[in-house]
Every structure is written in structure tokens, then in C-alpha cells.
């Protein structure tokens, strides 16, 4: 309903003095845990997620060696229509997990975990029909991973 604008030179130069960027950074810093939905679109993250990241990453304020987000648990659900796992033909096209891991673990020093349902297009693409059992197994694993992560976060946040 209210998409974030892409970062412009003025907001980038203002850093934490930009009201929108400061509000987004403060909201992120106040989170006990962060959940990111990141479907793979054309081998990368959606532009809306990239716009949010560009607004919220403020080097010297919340990103860098003394990040205020250090230790915050971040869970990324990174779905994709095909498979980009190690050993698959498209392994080298995996830019979602690699990028988000560098941002969250590298720039923010958070504890980042990924839940990765793959082959989500298998049911709708006839050429992928033989992959339906793998897609169903991936979905089941992702749901199990999500339940396990939710229980672990609930325990951690209750402590």
C-alpha cells in the first residue's frame, strides 16, 4: 500500500539524519527477531526488498563492526522456482542467499538462518513434472524447518 522509495543521493548522504531511514533503522533495531520473505526473482531478491535494504543499511549507524543489530536472530525464507543448491546446474546463479547472508551476517553481525523451499514451479511447469516429488520433499523440509525455528525463537525470546 505504501512502497518504500528507492534510495536517492540526498537520502544516502543524509544517512541516519534522513527521517525515513532513521525510522526504518530504529524499527529494525527494536526487533527481537526479524523474518524476511525473499522469493527469487530473476536470480536475485525482489526490488522491494532491495529498496528496504538500501534505506535501512546505514554504515556507521547500524551497519559495520559495531552494529547495534549484533546477535539479533534473522530468518530468511528464500523460495525459488528451481534449484540452485550445491551440485545443481544452476548453483552459480544463487544470488539470494549469498547476498542476504553477506548483508545480515557481514554488515549487521546478526545470526542469520535460511529456510529454502525449492522447485516451487514444479507443479505448474510441465517440463518440471518429474521434479514434483523433490518439490514436495523440499516444501515439507521447509515447513519442518520453519516449525523448528519458531520453537527455538519462542524459547529464546521467552528467556
Image (cartoon, helix red, strand yellow):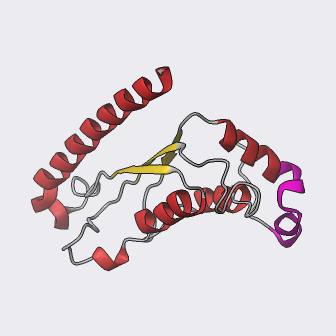
Quadrant (top left, top right, bottom left, bottom right) of the N terminus: top right
Q: Is residue 92 magenta?
A: no
Could you say which is closer to the camera, residue 85 or residue 30? 30
Could you say which is closer to the camera, residue 14 or residue 140? 14
User: In percent of the image, x 84 and y 55: which residue is there?
Assistant: 16
Q: Is residue 75 above or below residue 85?
A: above
User: As drawn, which residue projects farthest toward the front?
Assistant: 66
Q: Where does the image place residue 2, in percent across and percent down from the top left?
A: 73, 45
Q: Say whether residue 23 is left or right of residue 47.
A: right
Q: Where does the image place residue 128, in percent across and percent down from the top left?
A: 18, 64
Query: Which quadrant of the structure image shows residue 51?
Result: bottom right
From which residue to which does the magenta span run? 8-20
Q: Where does the image place residue 18, in percent across and percent down from the top left?
A: 88, 55
User: In percent of the image, x 14 and y 59: which residue is there?
Assistant: 131
Q: Main secondary structure of the magenta part?
A: helix
Say if residue 36 shows up in the picture. yes
Say if residue 45 shows up in the picture. no
Q: Is residue 18 magenta?
A: yes
Q: Is residue 94 above or below residue 111?
A: below
Q: Where does the image place residue 102, in percent across and percent down from the top left?
A: 50, 66
Q: Say whether residue 34 is left or right of residue 88.
A: right
User: In percent of the image, x 67 and y 59: which residue is there?
Assistant: 63
User: In percent of the image, x 22 and y 78: which residue is there?
Assistant: 89
Amino acid at each position: 500500500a505504501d512502497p518504500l522509495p528507492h534510495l536517492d543521493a540526498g537520502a544516502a548522504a543524509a544517512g541516519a539524519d534522513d527521517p525515513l531511514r532513521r525510522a526504518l533503522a530504529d524499527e529494525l533495531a527494536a526487533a527481537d527477531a526479524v523474518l524476511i520473505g525473499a522469493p527469487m526473482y530473476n536470480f536475485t531478491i525482489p526490488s522491494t526488498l532491495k529498496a528496504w535494504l538500501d534505506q535501512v543499511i546505514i554504515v556507521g549507524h547500524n551497519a559495520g563492526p559495531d552494529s547495534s543489530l549484533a546477535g539479533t536472530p534473522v530468518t530468511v525464507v528464500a523460495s525459488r522456482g528451481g534449484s540452485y543448491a550445491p551440485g545443481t546446474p544452476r548453483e552459480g546463479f544463487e544470488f539470494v542467499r549469498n547476498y542476504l547472508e553477506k548483508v545480515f551476517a557481514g554488515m549487521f553481525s546478526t545470526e542469520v538462518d535460511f529456510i529454502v523451499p525449492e522447485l516451487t514451479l514444479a507443479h505448474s511447469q510441465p517440463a518440471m513434472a518429474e521434479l514434483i516429488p523433490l518439490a514436495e520433499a523440499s516444501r515439507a523440509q521447509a515447513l519442518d524447518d520453519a516449525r523448528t525455528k519458531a520453537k527455538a525463537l519462542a524459547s529464546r525470546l521467552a528467556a
